Each structure stands twice: as structure tokens, then as C-alpha cells.
């Protein structure tokens, strides 16, 4: 069911997310006020999954949900899938979120609300010291913190790595063709740096409810570290001109500082626990 009057387009890149597609859809629409819900479309941009995702979306569509799925048979990248979804979207407000329910559908109304004030809004894991990664293993926390720190000179947001964000379409269409790299690692970071947002505006942040356990695994392969470093290099160059040496030195320094700090905390806690047990 395609409606002509669409205000919000929610883009969800997917890869083997059949069961999450159903939960996401059936939780998302009721969480919006009725009027808002009627003006919202949900677009899955799928990496040619073979798990029945297409049939699932068709079934939801038959049930009356404004959902559709775009299948990408050749170009499978995550960022390029998001851009493809933006291209197909009819709404003035564009939102991107994961299918795996880490970005809770119930937080979408808050994100839409924030976009009435801010030209760009992200969901964040870090407001008020609550971190979704608190239960992650040490190595994942070090990588997460380290990679966020590396993006700090590019954006003031607390969570530059997040895949839950929204923006009005008008800022996207102001960009020159090819300005956004469809192969970039983090599309939200790319947009925050390259969009021409009004001067002195702030990026909105909402704390999305911490993820309920998602079905499925992280699909990020190891090569993304290189992809991220290349994206940072491009963005630093875009923002500050040619600063390769400073950039690489800062990158190494920050990574080692964070790793050292985390290791120190673990050893310190271990010694403290031992003392307390004695
Ligand atoms: N179309 C498409 N979708 C993909 C692809 N790879 C993953 N996805 C979909 O993209 C979403 C994010 O999946 P992952 O990238 O595997 O999630 P993650 O590793 O857990 O990453 C999380 O943490 C990041 C913070 O570092 C977040 O930025 C990210 O949004 C996500 O929450 C999911 O809906 C997944 O199905 C792809 O190649 N193509």
C-alpha cells in the first residue's frame, strides 16, 4: 500500500533480518500517533537476503502496514543501501535505523520530535553515563571508545558511530552529486561532516532505550577498520585540509591511550578485588 501523503520515511538496511522485520514493523507503527503513523513509510533496503524477508514484507504490506522492500542484487554495502533508501523515500523527514532492534522502534517518535528543533538528530548510547556497551567484552569497548574518539575533532556529538539518525531531506538535496561516499564506513558521520547545516545549530541527541537482545549477529567484517580509517582521512581532509601527519599521529596516540587506560582499569579492578577477598 503506497500512500501519496508521506511525511516521514524510515529507512532500514537489512541482511537476513526476517524475524526482526516483523517485530520492528509491528512495534514501530503503533508507537506513532495515528496521524503521524498514516504519514509514515517504512522502507527496507535488503542485501539480497535469502531468508524470506521479501515474503515477510509483502505479508506485512497485505496487513495494511506502509512497508516495502528494495532488493539490492549487486551493490550490497551498508552505507550505499542507506543512500539508496533515501533516494526512494517520499518523505520530507528521513530516518535511518538498524533492523536488529538495538535501535528501539519506540524511540522513533522522540527522534521525529527532536527534528522539529534540530536539523540533524542522532540516537545516542552515551547520555547520562548509560552505555549500551557496558556489558560488551573489553576489546569491543576499546574499539568502540577508540573509534568514537578518533571522530571527536569532526563532530561534537556523543555518539558519532551510530546508525540511528534523522534529518530533513532538504539538506541532503543541497549537496553536490557524489559528495557523499557510498562506500564510507559510517554514513551518519559522513553526513554530519558534509551536510551544510545552518550555522550555530546543534545536532540533537536522544537516548534510545537500551537494546533488547537482537536476533542475529553483527555483520561487520574485519576489513571495516581499514574502511573507517580511510573515511576519517577523507573527512579530516574535507574539514581541515591536508593534515595527514597530524591525523595519523593523533590516531595512534588516541588508540594507545584508550587501550592503556582500559587495561589499567582492568588490572586495578583485579588487584582491588583480590585485596577485598583477602
Ligand atoms: N543492506 C544491507 N544491510 C546491512 C548490511 N550489513 C548489515 N546490514 C544491516 O545493517 C544493520 C546494522 O547491522 P550491523 O552493521 O551488523 O550492526 P552492528 O555491527 O551491531 O553495528 C551497530 O553498532 C554500530 C556502532 O558502532 C552502529 O553504528 C550500527 O548502527 C549498529 O547499531 C542491520 O539492520 C543489518 O541487517 C549490508 O551489507 N547491506
Image (tube, rainbow, N blue to C red):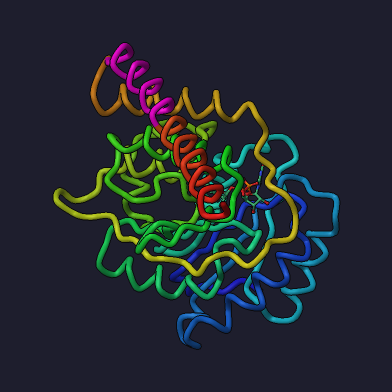
42 relative to 73 in the view: left or right: left
Query: Residue 206: x and y, percent?
Result: 38, 65
Q: Quadrant of the N terminus?
A: bottom right
Q: Residue furthest top?
A: 245
Q: Position of residue 70 (x, y in %)?
A: 68, 53
**View extreme (front): residue:** 278
Asked if residue 96 is among those painted magenta in the image, a careful observer would answer no
Indicate yes or no whether the magenta region holds residue 251.
Answer: yes
Question: Looking at the image, can residue 277 be seen?
Answer: yes
Rendering coords of residue 246 (x, y %): 28, 16
Give 148 or 139, whichever is nearer the viewer: 139
Q: Quadrant of residue 77?
A: top right
Numbered-mark total: 0
Query: Which residue is depicted at the point 49% across and 35% down?
Result: 263
Q: Answer whether residue 168 is visible to the viewer in this image.
A: no
Instruction: Give the quadrant of residue 67.
Output: bottom right
Looking at the image, residue 183 lies above or below residue 78: above
Residue placed furthest toward the bottom: 34
Q: Main secondary structure of the magenta part?
A: helix
Between residue 257 and residue 272, name the one nearer to us.
272
Tell me the magenta residue range: 243-257
Residue under the point 65% across and 58% down: 44
| Residue closer to the observer: 244 or 70 | 244
Relative to residue 244, is residue 83 depicted above or below? Answer: below
Residue at point 60%, 42% (across, down): 78
Q: Position of residue 17 (x, y in %)?
A: 74, 57
Give the residue displayed 34% in from the left and 16% down from the top: 249
- Vertical position of residue 159 compared to residue 228: above or below: below
Amino acid at each position: 500500500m503506497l500512500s501519496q501523503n508521506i511525511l516521514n520515511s524510515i529507512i532500514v538496511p537489512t541482511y537476513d533480518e526476517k524475524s526482526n522485520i516483523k517485530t520492528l514493523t509491528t512495534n514501530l507503527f503503533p508507537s506513532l500517533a495515528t496521524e503521524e503513523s498514516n504519514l509514515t513509510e517504512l522502507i527496507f533496503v535488503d542485501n539480497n537476503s535469502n531468508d524470506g524477508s521479501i515474503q515477510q514484507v509483502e505479508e506485512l504490506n497485505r496487513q495494511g502496514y506502509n512497508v516495502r522492500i528494495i532488493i539490492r542484487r549487486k551493490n550490497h554495502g551498508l552505507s550505499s543501501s542507506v543512500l539508496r533508501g533515501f533516494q526512494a523515500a517520499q518523505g520530507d523527514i528521513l530516518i535511518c535505523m538498524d533492523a536488529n532492534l538495538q535501535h528501539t522502534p519506540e524511540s522513533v517518535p522522540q527522534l521525529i520530535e527532536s527534528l522539529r528543533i534540530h536539523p540533524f538528530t542522532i540516537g545516542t548510547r552515551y547520555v547520562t553515563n548509560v552505555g549500551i556497551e557496558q556489558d560488551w567484552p573489553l576489546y569491543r569497548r576499546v574499539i568502540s571508545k577508540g573509534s568514537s574518539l578518533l571522530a571527536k575533532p569532526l563532530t561534537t556529538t556523543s555518539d558519532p558511530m551510530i546508525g540511528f539518525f534523522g534529518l530533513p531531506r532538504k539538506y541532503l538535496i543541497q549537496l553536490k552529486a557524489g559528495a557523499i561516499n557510498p562506500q564510507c564506513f559510517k554514513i551518519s558521520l559522513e553526513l554530519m561532516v558534509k551536510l551544510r547545516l545552518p550555522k550555530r545549530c546543534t545536532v540533537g541527541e536522544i537516548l534510545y532505550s537500551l537494546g533488547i537482545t537482537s536476533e542475529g549477529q553483527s555483520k561487520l567484517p574485519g576489513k571495516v577498520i581499514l574502511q573507517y580509517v580511510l573515511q576519517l582521512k577523507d573527512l579530516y581532509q574535507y574539514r581541515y585540509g591536508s593534515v595527514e601527519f597530524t591525523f595519523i599521529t593523533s590516531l595512534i596516540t588516541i588508540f594507545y591511550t584508550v587501550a592503556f587506560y582500559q587495561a589499567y582499569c582492568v588490572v586495578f579492578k583485579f588487584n582491588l578485588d583480590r585485596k577485598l577477598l583477602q
